Amino acid sequence: MNKPLLSRHLQLRNMLFKHWKTKGLKKGEKIESQNDIKTFCDFSLITIIKTLNDLQAEGIIERKVGKGSYLQNAPWFTSHLRIGFFYNREVVGGGIFHNSFYTKLVVAFEKQVISDGHEFILGSFTHKQKPVLLWDDLDAIVLTGVTKKTEIDDFKKTSCLLSLLDTPSIKLSNSNYRINLKPSFSELLKFIKGKKNNILYLDSIIKSPKQTARLTDFKNVFKSKSKDLKLKFINVDQEFDVKKTDNIVKAILSFKPDIVCGYIHSDWYELIEKVSSKQVNIYSLLIDSKKPGFIVDSNKWMKEILPDIYSRLDNRKITNQPKPYTAVFVK
């Protein structure tokens, strides 16, 4: 027969820590009474009383006669934070360091966390498997690569502050640090105004809230704007099967685009230019790049994201969504 690895007292202790950390309790704030604790956990009153007595003896809680118990110390009461960046390895093909966009993003995130005097942890998850126990040991994590296939129930089980990177979703209430490409699309439209252009948009086969929102923004900006503009959309795999380019070549040869934009792998730039029978302008979402495209400055973005995370750690009651980061169109 399997026995629990932890005694009932330690199980309750860990559960209370997780509960109080999730609530964002600070030093001096009141905790639940032993009877209140009994209502939301499956422990006997004897175990609860013993555990609270132990916490009082350790100086973690303080009991005041007639007033209740108050939190005085806890493992998360520290100015030194443990901040994690976790990516979905079923979405980011070949690992995060095989993707130049995510590589630069992670480096900028780590640099800012370390510069702020905190500890950086890099990890991964899948659509089904999440390292919740590891997350519980961290103060905050940022997740990227959450799609419609990702099971999100575990997101609600961790005590750490969980945020999302560029993942718009009505099913998730977590703070979401989005990239807003709509103004860049509008700038592109202004740039080509009055000129005849065939625009080929490469849309990712990896369906996600981010992908859907980006495609919708593009269509809303360019629809019915001019009879001089012709649009064509094709699906591509920019993460896992980047050598499968037959449909790209076919679209270029038949449609003869003046502009190619959307999800464009770095290996495809040379191919697109080689196959095109005329000069073609390529605009993709890029990070810290001097190439034409929709550009994200990673340092500026991190200086928006991390102070907001620190504020939300300090006050877990903040529920409003952070302001999206606006990418810049470079001609």
Image (spheres, helix red, strand yellow):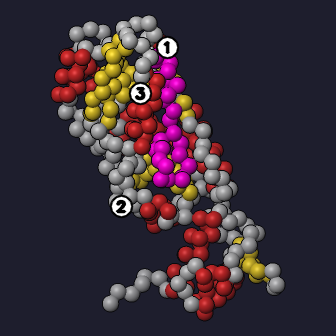
Q: Is residue 112 left or right of residue 237?
A: right
Q: Secondary structure at mark 1?
A: helix
Q: Secondary structure at mark 3?
A: helix
Residue placed most toward the observer, 245 or 78: 245
The residue type indicated by label 3 comes to: Lys
Q: What residue sits 40% from the left and 60% below the top?
A: 130
Check the picture and name the quadrant holding the C terminus: top left
Q: Secondary structure at mark 2?
A: loop
Rendering coords of residue 117 (x, y %) = 61, 49
Residue 120 visible: no
* Range covered by the magenta-colored residues: 165-190
Q: Which mark is residue 219?
A: 3
Frontmost of labels 3 and 2 is 3
Label 1 crowding class (10 Å Cα cut-off): few <14, some 14-19, many 20+?
A: few
| Residue that carries the numbered disc 1 in the rendered image | 190
Residue lying at the far right in this picture: please name it. Answer: 66
The residue type indicated by label 1 comes to: Lys
Frontmost of labels 1 and 3 is 3
Asked if marks 1 and 2 touch (Cβ < 8 Å), the reply is no
Label 3 crowding class (10 Å Cα cut-off): few <14, some 14-19, many 20+?
A: some
Residue placed most toward the observer, 183 or 22: 183
Q: Is residue 260 left or right of residue 288?
A: left
Frontmost of labels 1 and 2 is 1
Q: Quadrant of residue 99?
A: top left
Q: How many angstroms separate mark 3 from mark 2 (CA)?
A: 35 Å
Q: Which mark is residue 129?
A: 2
Rendering coords of residue 302 (x, y %) = 56, 39
Asked if marks 1 and 3 touch (Cβ < 8 Å), the reply is no
Label 2 crowding class (10 Å Cα cut-off): few <14, some 14-19, many 20+?
A: few
Q: Is residue 260 magenta?
A: no
